[in-house]
């Protein structure tokens, strides 16, 4: 009897340790994101809550599946017709572009591409004063490492996308349109 209760106590303690460790890892991943900053650039925490922002649209290249999300200020501006109505996006508008490597949906015979591993997150934030040199937008990219469940910032500064996004200067530097829903 004594041996059984000793065994039970050990099992309970071991299970608690595993759960505790898992919680710590999950907490670490979240905390890791919040402590990240692009040198001389934007902090990951400036985009807190991005995980639950609304979808603006999706896009796909040969090697990436992407979802573009916007915070409420960005979504409201789109719904009001920006940038087609000649209006620019307001200060405080933020976007996140989540990028995954694609895989084939395993349970279905014909080809359906679905997200496999998260690869990068691209962020944009509108602040006309702070980013006057880059048409009012600040840019930041964070690369994801699944093996360690961590992110690392790309490069330095907040202008990584400015040169290319100039192509759509007439649309306030935003390529993506608000997909009909
Ligand atoms: C590394 C810094 C960069 C960041 C943080 C960034 C950020 C973003 C974000 C948030 C979007 C979605 C909103 C939109 O459509 O404008 C986007 C889309 C886009 N960006 Fe950038 N960008 C970066 C660099 C670049 C560069 C260097 C190019 C061109 C070579 C580029 C070309 C595009 C294109 C074509 C789209 C629309 C298609 C798509 O969904 O991917 N970006 N970018």
Image (cartoon, rainbow, N blue to C red):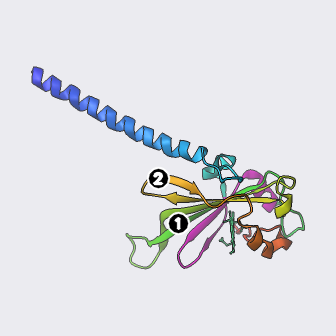
Does 149 sit above or below residue 4?
Answer: below
Q: Is residue 46 visible?
A: yes
Q: Quadrant of the rendered structure where residue 121 is? A: bottom right
Closer to the camera in the image, 121 or 112: 121
Residue 2 on image: x %, y %: 11, 20
- As drawn, which residue projects farthest toward the right? 86
Count residues near mark 2 (Cα–Cα under 10 Å), then give few for <14, some for 14-19, many for 20+: some
Numbered disc 1: secondary structure: strand
Q: Which image quarter holds the C terminus?
A: bottom right
Residue at 80%, 72% in the rendered image: 166
- Is the residue marked 2 within 8 Å of ligand 1, measured from its CB? no
Q: Which image quarter holds the N terminus?
A: top left
Comparing labels 1 and 2, the label whose residue is closer to the camera: 2
Numbered disc 2: secondary structure: loop
Q: Quadrant of ligand 1?
A: bottom right
Residue at 83%, 52% in the rendered image: 130
Magenta span contains residue 76: yes
Residue at 72%, 58% in the rendered image: 157
Closer to the camera in the image, 171 or 177: 171
Magenta span contains residue 95: no
Residue 156 on image: x %, y %: 68, 58
- Is the residue marked 1 within 8 Å of ligand 1, measured from its CB? no
Residue 10 has which mark?
none
- As drawn, which residue projects farthest toward the top? 2
Residue receiving disc 1: 100
Residue 178 on image: x %, y %: 73, 67
Q: CA distance from mark 1 to mark 2?
A: 14 Å
Residue 149 on image: x %, y %: 46, 52
Residue receiving disc 2: 149
* 121 on left or right of 169: left
Q: Quadrant of the rendered structure where residue 24 is? A: top left
Instruction: Please give the range of residues in magenta.
Output: 55-78
């Amino acid at each position: 009897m004594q041996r059984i209760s000793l065994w039970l106590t050990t099992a309970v303690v071991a299970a608690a340790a595993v759960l505790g460790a898992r919680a710590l890892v999950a907490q670490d991943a979240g905390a890791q994101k919040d402590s990240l900053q692009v040198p001389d650039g934007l902090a990951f925490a400036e985009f807190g809550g991005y995980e639950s922002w609304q979808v603006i649209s999706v896009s796909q290249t040969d090697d990436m599946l992407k979802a573009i999300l916007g915070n409420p200020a960005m979504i409201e501006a789109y719904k009001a017709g920006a940038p087609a109505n000649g209006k620019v996006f307001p200060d405080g508008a933020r976007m996140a572009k989540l990028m995954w490597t694609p895989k084939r949906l395993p349970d279905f015979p014909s080809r359906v591409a679905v997200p496999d591993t998260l690869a990068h997150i691209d962020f944009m934030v509108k602040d006309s004063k702070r980013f006057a040199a880059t048409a009012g937008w600040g840019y930041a990219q964070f690369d994801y490492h699944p093996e360690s469940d961590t992110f690392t910032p790309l490069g330095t500064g907040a202008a990584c996308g400015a040169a290319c996004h100039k192509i759509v200067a007439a649309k306030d530097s935003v390529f993506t349109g608000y997909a009909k829903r």
